[in-house]
Amino acid sequence: METLKIENLIRMKILILITFLFGFQSAHCQVNNKDDEQIYFLMGLMNDYLGRVYSPNDPAKKYFITDFYSSEQKALEAFVSAIKTSQMKISDFEISKDGEVDIPAYTTISSEKFINLFNQFYRFKKADYKYEDKKGKEFSFYWGIIKYSKFKNNTHKKLFLKGAFIRSGSITLDGNYQYVYSNPISKHNLTTRFLNSLGCKILEYKEITETIPASVTIIFKPTEELKNFLIY
């Protein structure tokens, strides 16, 4: 009888442990899912001018995430706010301004801890030439193109489109919606594919290569669901 009580006690402890571990794992997965969804919004806010440049051997740029021009203050604030509401800590990011204190020329965001998280969304190709820093030292670098395959469902696509709309979108005088990208490498392609897959109507796709910088304009009519989602 005593042996039976001990065995039952052991079974109860094992059951409690399994229940605890399952609950912890579920909670942990929910946290990770929240983080994953935030990163898709942040990817929409990334600068795609001439693509993503990754220079792992340059001490000044190896942790570079993205930058924002002085005219993109709303996009910068959205980027910082998204980090603060995720499991990432804003203290793990370095935010530096170049230019005047009140009106910076641009703001650079870097992170040693999360550089790999952002880089995993890109397919990189090594450039066939090097660049010089201010001291004349040469560094090799890589061009990055966003991977379509990283966006697994409609929520990921909508979050990307929302981030991109905050940075590069607007409503035209006739009530249509548009994205305007300068010298883009991959965001314009993803934008078009995502809009089509979500049931939006592309009214005009205009690519201008004769100007500096070149530009791509995508004018579209969003679904009612996406229209409400895009407004920030």
Image (cartoon, rainbow, N blue to C red):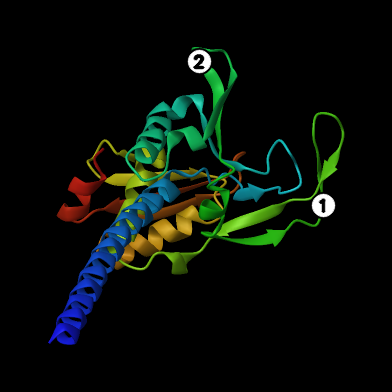
The amino acid sitting under disc 1 is: Tyr
Placement of 116 over or under 214, stated as above or below: below
Placement of 131 over or under 19, stated as above or below: above
Instruction: Look at 74% across and 51% down and name the residue there.
Output: 141
Image x and y of residue 211, in percent: 60, 41
**Between residues 85 and 125, which one lies in front from this camera angle?**
85
Image x and y of residue 13, in percent: 22, 72
Q: Counting residues from the N terminus, which is met first, the one under dot 1 or under dot 2? A: 2
* Tag 1 secondary structure: loop
Q: Is residue 219 visible?
A: no
Placement of 149 over or under 158, stated as above or below: below
Instruction: Look at 31% across and 62% down and name the residue there.
Output: 29
Q: Which mark is residue 185?
A: none
Instruction: Look at 23% across and 53% down and name the residue there.
Output: 222
The residue wearing badge 2 is 103
The amino acid sitting under disc 2 is: Ile
Image quadrant occupied by the N terminus: bottom left
The reply to whether dot 1 and dot 2 touch (C-beta < 8 Å) is no
**Between residues 24 and 81, which one lies in front from this camera angle?**
24
Task: Count numbered badges in the picture.
Answer: 2
The Cα–Cα distance between marks 1 and 2, rounded to whole angstroms, is 34 Å
The residue wearing badge 1 is 129
Image x and y of residue 158, in percent: 30, 55
Image quadrant occupied by the C terminus: top left
**Between residues 14 and 227, which one lies in front from this camera angle?**
14
Instruction: Look at 66% across and 54% down and name the residue there.
Output: 143
